[in-house]
Image (spheres, rainbow, N blue to C red):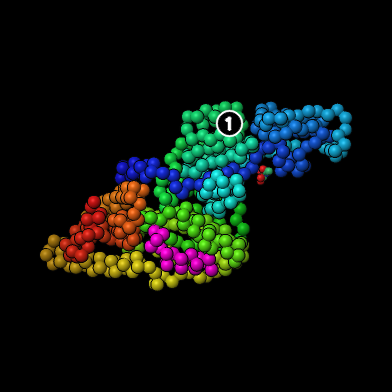
Amino acid sequence: MLKTPDVLLLACLVGAASALYKQWVPDTNYENKTNWDKKAVPCGNDIVEFSAQREVSVFVETTHAMQEMRLPLDGEFILDSGAGFYAVSGKDPSCGAGVTTQFKDSESLQWFDPALWQAAATLDDLQRGNFLFSVHEESVPCRYDDVVFKVRSSFRVDISSGQSSIPVKSVSVLGRMFDSRSEFSEYLSSRSGRLQFHGSSSVAVGEPGCGDPSGCDCGNSAHHQRICGTVTCASPSCDKPLLPAGHCCNICGAIVTIHSAAGFNLQTYRQRIYHLFLILPQYKSIQLGMNKVFKPQRLMGIIPFGTSPEIQVVILDGEKGTQSEALARDIVRDAHSHGSNLGITGAEFQASSGGSSDQSGGTAGMVVGVVFGVLIMLTLVIVGVVLIRKGVVQMPSLPSLPSLSRLKRSSDVGELSGPLDHGYDNPMFDKPTMLPDIPGLYGTEINNSISLTQTGVHFVNPVYDENETDFNA
Ligand SMILES: *[C@@H]1O[C@H](CO)[C@@H](O)[C@H](O)[C@H]1NC(C)=O
């Protein structure tokens, strides 16, 4: 168990993969008219007022005239080259009658407000406005994301959180990128840093990127309440609203669940879905987001053991969710016909319009799973009968205790060998169809079922010897 973080770290160092760029939307720029209470940038006849009590860092791009300016107790102007202020004594004919206009208060804008972030796969996409939809938890920067504050722009963000620091991969401020923890904490304690970031915690950069091509855990579930506290949910207009994992609100749309194996690449798959489906005219109003979620696993539906990763595809359309269901069907069909090339072992969906995929017509993995399950039940029964007959066991509770503890141990082995195998086989040899594919192919549920056979029933079924050597390796 102790070794798990090391293994994860190792996997993370292999290379950044499915991390995103998250850009903070609001600014405290003088030229942004949304920052003024009169909804206009002040001109020569106006009196400019900054609230005395507020601290603010204001970016100024050009030269501005005014009658008078009232400054805050603490604040700064970041002047672009050629920018400045001058007071006019007479009337400016190009300006109106002259008003007192106040700079907007940015004090309450919170880091954990999902509405204040835009996400994109690359910096280029960020600039071109090709933004990605995400569930609320992942709209806010994840620990492996690059955080971007716009170039030629200043801001003020409340970074209060329940924890001492918010970990991210890097932060770019005013065009300068920080990925070293010490350099950024130095920036945070600078004058600009203190005016831009305020609140009870700190932002810590230098986290490793996401090294798993199939996606990583965002790490924001600890902040779920804080994130959802900023979100107002509209009441859904469909019959059976769905609640995606990591989202704050019920949605009308569909959720596709993808079961992935070695060789699955979240970024590539996201692009595939965009180019195959989202460009189609009938899906114009669709919003689609993909993320990795960890579903709690239960052996035979009762005994919890760890979690299994799944890819959650959230599909929303503005309407009643009918387009979403059509798209969900397309995605599941695509996954079934091209899954082996994409590293997908299964896919199913649920739609708020009432539709869902046919579970029984599932994939090879599911069929094999059912067969394995039945075989294991049978072997357990046989072993039980044999043990009771030989007089080894009298009480039914006795055999369940040792087998449980063994089960735990073997599932640990499974967790450890999983990422290790992927880390070595995937990037170095780039062969998705090697040994690690086998556990993934049959799903984690069956892995553990196999582990169960390993704990003492293995002699019954020599057919599975091959799988067992996998797990011991
Ligand atoms: C002005 O601020 C608003 C809200 O903070 C933001 O959405 C918009 O992008 C900004 N305008 C520009 C030109 O940056």
168 and 382: which is toward the camera: 168
User: Dividing the picture into quarters, in which one does residue 395 lie?
Assistant: bottom left
Residue appearing at x 37%, y 45% in the figure = 11
Residue 265: % across, % down: 43, 54
Mark 1 = which residue?
Answer: 193
Is residue 327 inside the magenta stretch? yes
Point out residue 41 in the picture as x, y percentages from the top left corner.
Answer: 76, 39
Name the residue at 78% across, 37% down. Answer: 42
Where ligand 1 lies, by image quadrant?
Answer: top right
Residue located 25% across and 65% down the image: 376
Secondary structure under the numbered disc 1 in the rendered image: helix
Q: Is residue 386 above or below residue 207?
A: below
**Residue 101 on the magenta segment:** no
Front residue of 408 and 285:
285
> Is residue 201 visible from the viewing direction of this image?
no
User: Residue type at mark 1?
Assistant: Gly
The reply, left or right, for residue 262 in relation to residue 179 is left
Residue 100 lies, with reference to residue 246, above or below; the image says above
Q: Is mark 1 within 8 Å of ligand 1?
A: no
Based on the displayed image, in which of its 4 quarters is residue 443 positioned? Answer: bottom left
* In the depicted structure, whether residue 335 falls above or below residue 26: below
Horizontal placement of 381 versus 355: left or right? left
The furthest residue to the left: 390
User: Is residue 62 rendered to the left or right of residue 276?
Assistant: right
Tell me the quarter of the image containing the N terminus: top left
- Rendered location of residue 381, percent (x, y): 22, 67
* Image location (x, y in percent) of residue 2: 31, 42
Task: Tell me where residue 403 sits by quadrant.
Answer: bottom left
* Prevailing SS of the magenta stretch: helix
Kindly identify the residue that appears in the image at 57 percent across and 48 percent down. 125
- From this viewpoint, is residue 335 visible? yes
Q: Which residues are magenta?
A: 325-343
